[in-house]
Image (cartoon, grey):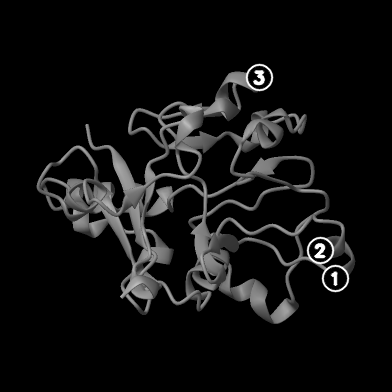
Amino acid sequence: MTRWGMVIDLDRCTACGACVVACKIENNVPFSSPDEASKGRAISWMEIISVKEKESNGFKISFLPRLCFHCENPPCIRVCPVGATYKNKEGLVTQIYPRCIGCRYCANACPYTAKYFNWYEPEWPEDMKKSLNPDVSIRTKGVIEKCTFCYHRLVKAKEKARVENKDLNNIEYVPACVEICPSNAMYFGDLDDPLSEVAILSRSERAFRLLEELGTEPKVIYLKEIKNER
């Protein structure tokens, strides 16, 4: 079984935000009013976070695209009292929206703050409603949502392969953020295929995982930035 994962090369990432925008459009992530955003209630499945590191001659600010890491050992699943959050057979951490009771235990358990609660009914400008993605369900007030690695794209790729009576080609399934990245900083594929690009990059000396010491085993791996070391 394929074990989907992502590698993000921080040396290539320019923090342009294209991945953030592509994610919002692809997954029908609702807008937030300035008032809701000021309360920390904005929803962003993909977010550019800044990390301040001390150096010998001062401080360095790095930018990391942050999404759900689809952990091998996800703490969010253990605390869900109704089984609304679970890991599917392909290892993706998914959410059953109608089952979610909005207790937010999972959001509090996630050390990466990658899960979002819908504090309000989703709204879009009238002109944008026609551009909503029909392949992605609209989440309602009172439920948790997060990145799915654009799982709907995997479903469509599988269906296409079935109709064409062929095996699924892994390159036919790519999340929107990876597809849009203008600097080719994001890679996606099967971590268990030793010859895949993500598997090779995940074994790089530059590879690291956020908060790896927690034992969550994230399937999003970063490549250390080196441009400031040249």
Q: Position of residue 6 (x, y in %)?
A: 34, 51
Q: From the viewer's perspective, is 41 left or right of 202?
A: right
Q: Is residue 59 above or below residue 46?
A: below
| Residue drawn where x is 72% and y is 67% of the image | 31
Foreground residue, 195 or 209? 209
* Residues at marks 2 and 1, CA–CA distance in whole angstroms: 5 Å
Q: Are marks 2 and 3 in contact (CB under 8 Å)?
A: no
Name the disc covering residue 34, or none. Answer: 1
| Amino acid identity at mark 1 | Pro
Q: Position of residue 196 (x, y in %)?
A: 15, 50
Q: Which residue is mark 2?
A: 37
Residue drawn at point x = 74 percent, y = 33 percent: 104
Residue 209 rendering spot, x and y as whole percentages? 41, 44
Quadrant of the image containing the N terminus: top left
Identity, as a three-letter code, of the amino acid under mark 3: Val
Instruction: Say which quarter of the image contains residue 180.
Output: bottom left
Q: What type is the residue that disc 2 sits on?
A: Ala
Q: CA–CA distance between discs 2 and 3?
A: 29 Å
Residue 116: image x %, image y %?
Answer: 69, 47
Residue 47, can we see it? no
Q: Which mark is residue 84?
A: none
Q: Is residue 89 visible?
A: yes
Helix, strand or loop at disc 3? loop
Residue on which disc 3 sits:
82
Say whether marks 2 and 1 touch (CB < 8 Å): yes
